[in-house]
Image (spheres, rainbow, N blue to C red):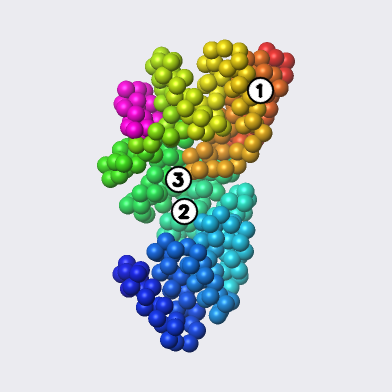
Amino acid sequence: RLAAGDAGGARADLEAASRSGPPDPLVAFALGEALEALGEDSAAVEGYSRAIELDHRFAPALVRRAARRLAGGDPREGLADATLAIRYEPWLAEAYVVRSRALLDLGMARAALEDGDAALVLDPSDADAWVAQSRAHAAGGDRREALLSLGTAVAMRPDDVALRLEHATALLEEGRMGSMGGWEEAEGTFSGLIERSPDRTELWWGRGVARAGEGRHEEALADLDRALALDPRSARARADRGMLLLGLRDAERARTDLAAALEEDPGNERALRTSILLAGTASDREALIGRAREALGRSTGKCDGLDTRDRRGMEWFRIAQALHALGERSLALSALDRSIDDLPPSLAGSARALRPRFEAGK
C-alpha cells in the first residue's frame, strides 16, 4: 500500500501487524516510512528508533532517522546516525548524502564535499547526491561547480518543483554576480514554474528580479507587485522592488518599500545599504547606521537557500561602500572585513585592496 501511495492504509496494516506479531525491525521501519509520508515526523522518528532497537545495525533506519533529525534542526544527532549507517553499510549512497547535509549544516563544507563525492561514486544517478554536491560546492565558494551539479540534478528530476526553484534561485545569484546568461535562464525557469504554481510568492519575486537584471523594468515591477499582492510581508520582494523603483527614479516609493523591508527583516542588507544612502536627515542616517552596527554584530551564517556566501559577501561589500561614503570609517572597515571573509578569492582580493583607502578615509 505504501508503494501505491496509500500511506494511511499502510499505517493501519503495519500497526495491526506490529500488535499481532513478534517484534520485527522491518515492520517498525515500514511504519516509520508510512508515518513520515503522512507528515508525522515525531512518530516517524519513533518508528525508526524502534527498528534500530530491534536491530542496531539497521542502516536504512539510521539514515531515515538521521534525515528526520536534520529536518527537525538537530544536525549533530543526524550526523551521528548517518555515520553509524556508513559504518554498517559503507555502500549505501543515501547515507553519504544525508551525512553531507549534516556536515554542511555544521559548517564543514570540505567534509560535506567529500561525502558528496563518495555518494556519486556509489550512485551517479542519484539526484539527491548531485544536490548535496551542489550545496557543498556553493558553501565552499565554487559557484560554477555548484550550478553544474544542480543542473544535473534538475535534468534527472525535471518535474521536481522544489529542485527547479533551487536551481532558478542559483541562477539569480549568477545574474547578481554579473552573468547575463544567469538572468535569462532564471527568467525562463521562473516563468515555467509560475505556469504550474501561479500563487507562489517566491516565483513572482524570482522572475521580477531576473527581469530587472535583464533591463525589463516595467515587467519586473509588475511581477514584484504580484509577489507583494500574494504576500505583503515579503521582505525580499519589498527590498528588490525598492531597489527597482529607485532605478526608475521613484525615490519616494522606493523609501517606503525599503522601510517596510527593514520592518520585516531589520538585517536585510540590500534594504539597509540603500536606505543609508537615501536617508534624508542626519537622525535618519544615524538610526540606519545603528541598524548596520547591529547587523555587523549578528551572525550571518543562516542561509535560507537564497543568501549564499558569495551573495552575503557582495552585500557586505556594498554596505561598506555606503558607510565609507558617509565617513563612518570604523563601521566601513568592519563591513569590508566581513565581505572579505565571505567573497570568493577572485573578488576578496579586490575588496582587500580597498582597505588602505578605507583606513585613510579617502
> Which amino acid type corresponds to the residue marked 1 in the rendered image?
Ala
Residue at image location 58% in from the left, 61% down from the top: 78
Q: Which residue is mark 1?
A: 332
What residue sits right under mark 2 in the picture? Answer: 130
Give the main secondary structure, helix, strand or loop, of the magenta stretch: helix
Q: Nearer the viewer, residue 43 or 148?
A: 43
Name the residue: 42% across, 32% down.
Answer: 237
Residue 128 percent across, percent down from the top left: 45, 56
Looking at the rendering, the stretch of residues picked out in magenta corresponds to 209-229
Is residue 325 visible in this depiction of the protein? no
The percent position of residue 228, horizontal first and vertical second, equals 37, 32
Secondary-structure class at tag 1: helix
Where does label 3 land, which residue?
148
Residue sitting farthest toward the left: 195
Q: Kindly report which numbered mark, 1 or 2, lies closer to the viewer in this rendering.
A: 1
Residue at position x 38%, y 73% in the image: 11
Dot 2: within a 10 Å radius of its alpha carbon, few (fewer than 14), some, or many (20 or more) residues? Answer: many
Residue kind at label 2, given as amino acid type: Trp
The number of discs equals: 3
Q: Which amino acid is tagged 3?
A: Leu
The question of residue 302 being in magenta is answered with: no
Earlier residue among tags 1 and 3: 3
Instruction: Say whether residue 337 is left or right of residue 183.
Output: right
Sequence-wise first label, 2 or 3: 2
